[in-house]
Amino acid sequence: MDLNIRHFILLMVVAATAAIFFLKPHHVTIIEKKGIPQVSFHNFTAYEIKKSGVTDILKGKRAQRFGSQTIVDLPDLHRLGERGEETVSARRAVFTEKRGIELKKDVKLQRSDGWTMRTSRLYYDLRNRLYTTGSAPFVITFGKSVVYGKKLRYYQKSGKIRAESIRAKIAEEDM
């Protein structure tokens, strides 16, 4: 009996040594199949922390990672910018590495100074820190003033806004 256990242990040592030399180490494979997320989070909160503290907080109902894209349902992003706090919400957001964020359906961009914009589609260019609506129409409210237009370009750093086909109703108390 003692001889059989020694042979078994010796056989296991030889097999383990052979496995180390002939088998590949464990690798994680990235799933690239359509419709199957690599990672999925539900009812989550994500933070961006810098030396100065927390600058961005993203909350959402569900986030799914597909290759270089992350799709977030009911995103609610709070960020601290040069012009104060900004809040962006929508029904869906698509975060693409190195390109930016596309927000879709019932998009609302609100600044802490009371300025609010609503549109159906909004793009955010990460590199240039630029919001654009493409050809989607938008409505901006500030106090009792209302501005309608399309093809908005809002430069986050400078606060400058450019747009086409603008119609505005400016209230006297907002001047």
Image: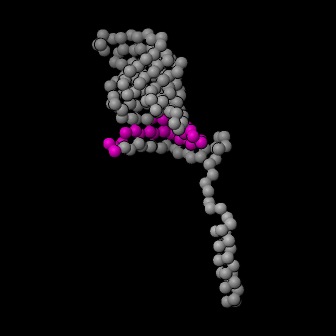
137 left or right, relative to 2: left
x and y, in percent, of residue 41 in the image: 53, 45
156 left or right, relative to 105: left
22 left or right, relative to 45: right
Residue 89 seen from this side: no
145 left or right, relative to 95: left
Q: Residue at x 53, y 28 (%)?
A: 104
x and y, in percent, of residue 163 in the image: 45, 16
Quarter of the figure with residue 139: top left
Q: Report if residue 57 lies within the magenta region.
A: yes
Residue 19 seen from this side: yes
Q: Residue at x 66, y 68 (%)?
A: 21
- For the N terminus, give its image quadrant: bottom right
Tell which of 137 and 144 is nearer to you. Answer: 137
The relative height of residue 25 versus residue 100 in the rendered view (above or below) is below
Q: Residue at x 36, y 11 (%)?
A: 170
- Magenta: main secondary structure equals strand
Tell which of 153 and 143 is nearer to you. Answer: 153
Q: Report if residue 129 lies within the magenta region.
A: no
Q: Which residues are magenta?
A: 51-76
